[in-house]
Image (spheres, helix red, strand yellow):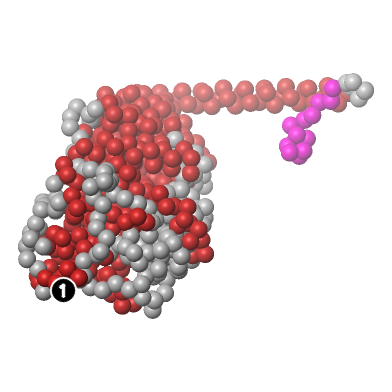
Amino acid sequence: MLKQFLSKLPRKSLKSDSAGRPESPRSGSPRSSSRNGSSGSGQGTSKSNGGNGATGGRSNAAKRTSSAVFPVSMVAGIEPLVPFKDVGSTEKMNLFVSKVSLCCVTFDFTDPTKNSAEKDVKRQTLLELVDFVASGSMKFNEHAILAMCRMCAVNLFRVFPPNYRSGMTDGNGENDDDEPMFDPAWPHLQLVYELLLKFITSPCLDAKTAKKYIDHSFILRLLDLLDSEDPRERDCLKTILHRAYGKFMVHRPFMRKSINNIIYRFVFETERHNGIAELLEIYGSIISGFALPLKEEHKIFLWRVLIPLHKPKSLGVYFQQLSYCIMQFLDKEQKLASIVIKGLLKYWPVTNSQKEVMFLGEIEEIMEAISMAEFQKVMVPLFWRIGCCINSLHFQVAERSLFLWNNDNIVNLIGHNREVILPVILPALERNVQNHWNQAVLNLTLNVRKMFAEMDDELFLSCHTQYKEEEAELSLATKKRKEAWERLEHVASLQPIAGNTAVLVTPLATSIAC
């Protein structure tokens, strides 16, 4: 049995002594992997081999079922190794390293009939490895950790093709074609992700030893994979990255900084990334663990990262996760509410009605948690903007803004500050009563107007009188301006047109010319 076991071990030993981090996938691949052959489409290369991978898989970039470009690979055939139960405990770790190395072979998954026997061997080996890691029977040494990192690099780290559908979005940031793109290699990728998750969370993995191999480069490549178009892969990565954040405390500042950089690039440069929602889910759990008082670094993240995320057109894709992160910050420190509202007013989507509805929903959620002191800091610009929304010709925006008065907490805030808010909001209500086309909006406006009258009848009458006087003054000024233009036009029409004489262009002529 021992001879049979030794004959199946790889001839080439692992170079773990000279490696301080996971080697590149090409140097860590078995002898069966070469530079010439068919394009692999299941497991791939690390970002360091991105150029070769892109060349080898260019023909598959536009295929609907493929979301990555893989390196060229030739499989000469692999054989299963003996099961873990057939070897002694002293040999199990060596067998683990051998089985992990066997899984470094890559295959072409675009053709289901190609290398079917070898694919099944690799799948069975991955299942064995998952069970072995989950059992927690032995502590992992450096050889095992290095082999695991190398295998993950070979199978997971790859180059994604251009996202040809990323520009085809509507106002909500949703693609015209809502069908997700699935990776044909997922049956193997899923097992590799499951193995990596159980490996990171295993109590047999020493974080101090593993941090040398699961280093900044490794974590950064995992974050890069969140741009995958396959939602199943992004979900696995989200869980793995969250567990890695909890396991490796030394990497936490780097992970936060890397997430910040991805979001910066998305907001201010590309506005194209498939994993923003998952990144925000990761950060939402991170925020819940922040200690009080909040560090300045975290407040800067709120102001410079989370609030600008309201700007992109694709807000609808990740709005729920973004709103959750915002509320997590406000639960930690209520004084940040006024800062958030000022940021929302700064990025208010005046030309996008669907985003306005989302903003109004978030404003309502914030106002339920805001303190009176913070509310008073922003109530004037906030209700001026709400007044503009009340007058919106898009009935959903006007309706959503008037629904704010159905919230008891908001009505209470308004009632305590009615002397300031009513003069700001009453003109918008009166304009709706006179001109709005939608009957539902008109009825809601009358209800809000009635609430103010019942809240403080004397103040309402005073503000209404002031509004009538201002309207009369504006009407008179408009009338005088019109008469002045008519006089100028009449005088100009009596003057003969000479060579250098200026010609008066009437507003009507200007509008026709435009």
Query: In x, y percent, where is residue 212?
Result: 23, 43
Q: Residues within 10 Å of mark 1 (few under 14, many from 20)?
A: few
Query: 212 or 65: which is nearer to us?
Result: 212
Q: Quadrant of residue 423?
A: top left
Asked if residue 133 is positioned above or below residue 512 in the image, the reply reads below
Q: Residue at x 88, y 23 (%)?
A: 494
Q: Magenta segment, which residues?
A: 502-514
Q: Left or right of 459: which side holds 173?
A: right
Disc 1 residue type?
Gln
In magenta segment, residue 503 = yes
In this picture, is 246 found above or below 179? above
Residue at label 1?
A: 4
Q: Is residue 323 covered in magenta?
A: no
Which residue is at 50% across, 58% downward?
Answer: 55
Q: Is residue 309 left or right of residue 295?
A: right
User: Do we see residue 493 in this rendering?
Assistant: yes
Q: Quadrant of residue 465?
A: top left
Q: Is residue 479 left or right of residue 186?
A: right
Residue 171 % position (x, y) = 48, 50
Is disc 1 placed on a helix, strand or loop? helix
Residue 476, quarter of the rendered image:
top right
